[in-house]
Image (tube, rainbow, N blue to C red):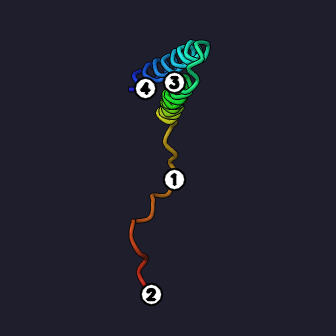
Amino acid sequence: MTWLRESLGVALLALGLFFFFHALGYIRDEKVLDGGLVVLMGIIIFNAGLHLLKVAAASRILSRREPDPDAHPAPPAGRPKAP
């Protein structure tokens, strides 16, 4: 599953960079507003790709971690009982 996240993250990074370069064409043609909107879309897509890569890296690190035998179980959820 991490390879899927990594490949989607890289694809989104590449798509975000494509949007940036596409926006340069708009800006060179003096369509600054259109170029600004394309840059905004590129930023959002690029950040999504970065986020997927970070999640994939964290997932890979945690999947290789050995369980701690001395770890205490999590306390039960809910309100503590009054004495």
Which residue does the numbered mark 3 point to in the structure image?
Answer: 34
Residue 23: image location, x then y, percent: 55, 18
Residue occupying image coordinates x 51% and y 53%:
71
Picture quarter containing residue 2?
top left
* Residue ID at (60%, 17%): 30
**Residue name at image x 49 percent, y 28 percent:** 41
The CA span between labels 2 and 1 is 26 Å
Say which element carries label 1: loop
In primary-sequence order, the first of circles 2 and 1 is 1
Distance CA(mark 4)–CA(mark 3)? 31 Å
15 and 4: which one is in front? 15
The percent position of residue 9, horizontal first and vertical second, equals 47, 23
Q: Nearer the viewer, mark 2 or mark 1?
A: 2
Q: Which mark is residue 83?
A: 2
Q: Position of residue 33 (x, y in %)?
A: 55, 27
| Residue type, label 3 | Asp
Give neighbour class at mark 2: few <14, some 14-19, many 20+ (Cα, 10 Å): few
Front disc: 3 or 1: 3
Mark 2 secondary-structure assignment: loop
Task: Report, in whole angstroms, how far the alpha carbon at label 4 lies from the one at label 1.
Answer: 29 Å
Q: Are marks 4 and 3 in contact (CB under 8 Å)?
A: no
Work out whether 29 lies above or below 63.
above
SS at badge 3: helix
Mark number displayed over residue 71: 1
Amino acid type, callout 1: Ala
Residue 43 lies in what quarter of the image?
Answer: top right
User: Residue under circle 4?
Assistant: 5
Would residue 64 be visible to someone looking at this image?
A: no
